[in-house]
Image (cartoon, rainbow, N blue to C red):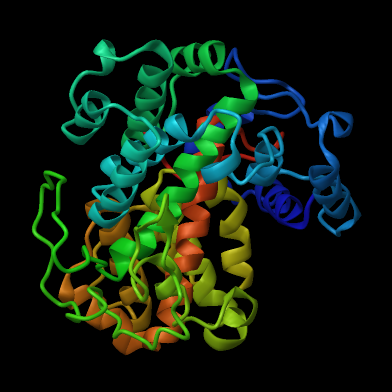
Amino acid sequence: MGRWVRAAVVLALAGAVPAWSSTARAGQLPDDINPESRNRLPPIDRTDLDAERRAAYDAAVASPDGAPTGAAALRLHGSGTLLRWEAPLGRRLIELTILTAARELDQPFEWALHEIEAIAVGLEDEIIDVVRHRKPFTTLPPREATIVEVGRELLGTRALGADTYARALRLLGKTNLVDVIDTLARYAMVGAELTGFNQQMPTGWRQSLPLPFTHPDDIHPDSRSRLPLRSAETTSTATVLYGRLLSPSGLGPNAIRTYGAGQATLEARVGRRVMQLAILVTARAHESQYVWTVNEPLARAAGLEPDLIDVVRHGQPLAGIDENDAAVIAFGREMFGDHTVSAETYARAERAFGVQDLVDIVRLMGEHAADAIVLQGFDQQLPEGVGPLLPLP
């Protein structure tokens, strides 16, 4: 049992589990949940893994946290390949998966680049149009339809119903379904970074998504984002597909990340308390019972005040809250809830943390958003004996 699980169990046994957890305490699991793994997949069998994933499994077992758990364990059921380029499902269906993520997250930059790639690898215009305009997917071939259905349901409702999951498992198989859900999750992480820093199309590119909002006009004309363009030597992010330049240097998620100092030093710079606040905001926005419940004890241990935790838990107003805390909460609520961050909210967060730390905080939130999506795709239940700490419908 990992350290965070032990902390959650201690909290539950100490009587800190609220009244809404009574059903979970009864120990009843949904019909499609494996009682050992407590999700829709069986426990990991090391002998089923290739050499690289066995190494990851062994490293996890040797760590203080023990065997792989949570999203890390679920990902081990996938192909273990570079999903964008080498997944057994093939480039055409992977690009369909990425486009579905971009559309559900209203992410125009991500859509624009991957629409070009999708066309290049043979995805039909008619299918792209179904995704772009959220048309019924019933006209699509079965595998294409189920990918769009899984993406819309998982990213749109923060859950994946048992019937949809069973249909996708039957049509795609376990490995491909894990790859699809993992791809949706990874591009949700990328989408958060692009949205947070308002990455727009390169000059002259057409914005082809029908978005429900107008992006704030607070971008630099050269980088086309909220971050000024750096020299080509430090932002070599161009992608080439069949000889065509896709992402001009200095634009996109890789360029955004160069402004950060990395996750390894984030705690030393902003403190564990701020990091745990960012994680709880992400869990609340994604209605992720698992991410919230295993992190609330860590947040309390890091010094996050119970009243502030309740503000996040219940979506309460931010009046009277410390300015830095309010900046994190407002940023996450808009980025994940509205799929756009206002100029005022961005400026508030930049004042609070500076560009470097804000880039890494957004990356942290994106990583936990990705984990939440994987966990919800396979309906990961809490560890046995641990009651939920997040009130959900």
At horizontal 55% and vertical 26% (from top left) the residue drawn is 177
354 over 74 or under it: above or below = below
Q: Position of residue 6 (x, y in %)?
A: 76, 52
Q: Is residue 78 left or right of residue 320?
A: right
Q: How many marks?
A: 0
90 over 389 or under it: above or below = above
Q: Is residue 67 left or right of residue 98?
A: right
Q: Indicate the quadrant containing the C terminus: top left, top right, bottom left or bottom right.
A: top left
At horizontal 37% and vertical 87% (from top left) the residue drawn is 230
Nearest the camera: 189 or 66? 189
At horizontal 55% and vertical 87% (from top left) the residue drawn is 269
Farthest residue to the front: give it.
243
Q: Is residue 26 visible?
A: no
Q: Position of residue 339 (x, y in %)?
A: 25, 54
Q: Is residue 163 visible?
A: yes
Q: Position of residue 82 (x, y in %)?
A: 61, 46
Q: Is residue 270 left or right of residue 113?
A: right
Res. 142 image quadrant: top left
At horizontal 78% and vertical 52% (from top left) the residue drawn is 2
Nearest the camera: 82 or 74? 82
Q: Position of residue 295 (x, y in %)?
A: 59, 57
Q: Is residue 240 left or right of residue 62?
A: left
Nearest the camera: 35 or 101? 101
165 over 315 or under it: above or below = above
